[in-house]
């Protein structure tokens, strides 16, 4: 499936909220608005019940695939409500411990689940996403999450979202204590990437062929630690072995400490 260079916004109903949000987003990002009825192979963004949704037709069977980001439901919502332990492999790798919440830059935000979890644990998190489409979905998820009476402060006070290439942005940003890299890797049979969200993410952003370059940039900005998320049996990034590894059930976190170069 080849994605178009610009994915249009569709306005397919006269519902006031959908029209308002569609026009707001189009004006903010100079996106085109289409009112034509979708074709079988269309891909477009649309507000459905106040939720910005990426709709892909013809991806899997004949059913339209709909992707949106909701940090307060699904896996992210479950972890928020039931699993804010600081002793997990992920939290340990990032450098979280009692009384310590490092500032974190999630350099490859994707759908934002890891970055949001770190913010829920109390870290100040900057998410960087270079895909314009995924960035829009992230922004909308944060917009809706910030309105939640109980959890809104996580979004308002602890999350910063930036659109761009982390390779270019990291040297320009304030120094972070932890740089987190979760590059897209080649799919494995039976892996989580067979799920529709990650399958679609791969089609949008492709494999991160410049992940080694990103790692070298991360080394040059000299944070307190660099954490690279990898599948358990996939080789590490670059030629330098990690300072140590933190193993999870199916993945591991390669942790690099200075001096890097």
Image (spheres, rainbow, N blue to C red):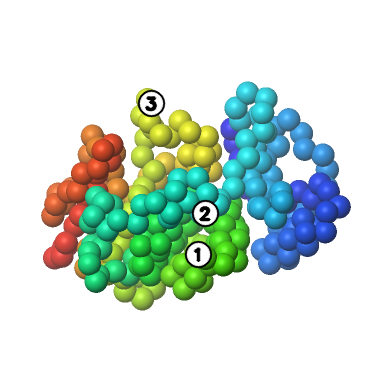
Q: Residues within 10 Å of mark 1 (few under 14, many from 20)?
A: some
**Quarter of the image where one finds residue 100:** bottom left
Describe the element under mark 3 as helix, strand or loop.
loop
Give x and y (percent) for residue 256: 19, 57
Task: Tell me how far mark 3 sits from mark 1, CA to CA.
Answer: 34 Å
Tag 3 residue: 190
**Residue at the (36%, 39%) spot, across then down:** 185
Tag 2 residue: 72
Tag 1 residue: 151
**Residue at the (60%, 36%) spot, across then down:** 2
Task: Tell me how far mark 1 sits from mark 2, CA to CA.
Answer: 9 Å
**205 and 118: which is toward the camera:** 118
Mark 3 or 2: the one toward you? 2
Q: Are marks 1 and 2 in contact (CB under 8 Å)?
A: yes
**Residue at the (41%, 34%) spot, across then down:** 192
Give x and y (percent) for residue 27: 73, 65
Give the side of residue 42 with respect to residue 126, left or right.
right
């Amino acid at each position: 499936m080849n994605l178009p260079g610009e994915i249009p916004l569709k306005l397919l109903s006269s519902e006031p909220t959908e029209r308002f949000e569609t026009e707001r987003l189009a004006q903010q990002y100079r996106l085109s608005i289409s009112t034509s009825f979708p074709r079988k192979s269309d891909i477009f963004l649309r507000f459905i019940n106040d939720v910005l949704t990426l709709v892909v037709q013809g991806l899997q069977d004949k059913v339209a695939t709909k992707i949106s980001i909701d940090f307060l439901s699904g896996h992210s919502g479950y972890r928020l409500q039931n699993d804010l332990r600081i002793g997990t492999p992920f939290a340990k790798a990032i450098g979280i411990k009692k009384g310590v919440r490092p500032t974190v830059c999630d350099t490859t935000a994707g759908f934002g689940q890891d970055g949001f979890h770190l913010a829920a644990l109390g870290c100040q998190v900057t998410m960087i996403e270079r895909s314009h489409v995924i960035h829009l979905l992230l922004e909308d998820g944060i917009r809706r999450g910030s309105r939640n009476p109980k959890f809104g402060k996580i979004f308002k006070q602890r999350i910063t979202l930036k659109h761009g290439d982390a390779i270019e942005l990291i040297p320009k940003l304030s120094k972070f204590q932890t740089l987190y890299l979760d590059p897209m890797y080649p799919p494995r049979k039976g892996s989580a990437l067979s799920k529709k969200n990650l399958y679609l993410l791969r089609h949008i952003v492709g494999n991160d062929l410049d992940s080694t370059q990103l790692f070298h940039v991360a080394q040059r900005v000299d944070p307190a630690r660099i954490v690279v998320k990898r599948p358990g049996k996939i080789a590490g990034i670059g030629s330098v072995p990690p300072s140590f590894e933190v193993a999870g059930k199916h993945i591991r976190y390669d942790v690099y400490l200075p001096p890097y170069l």
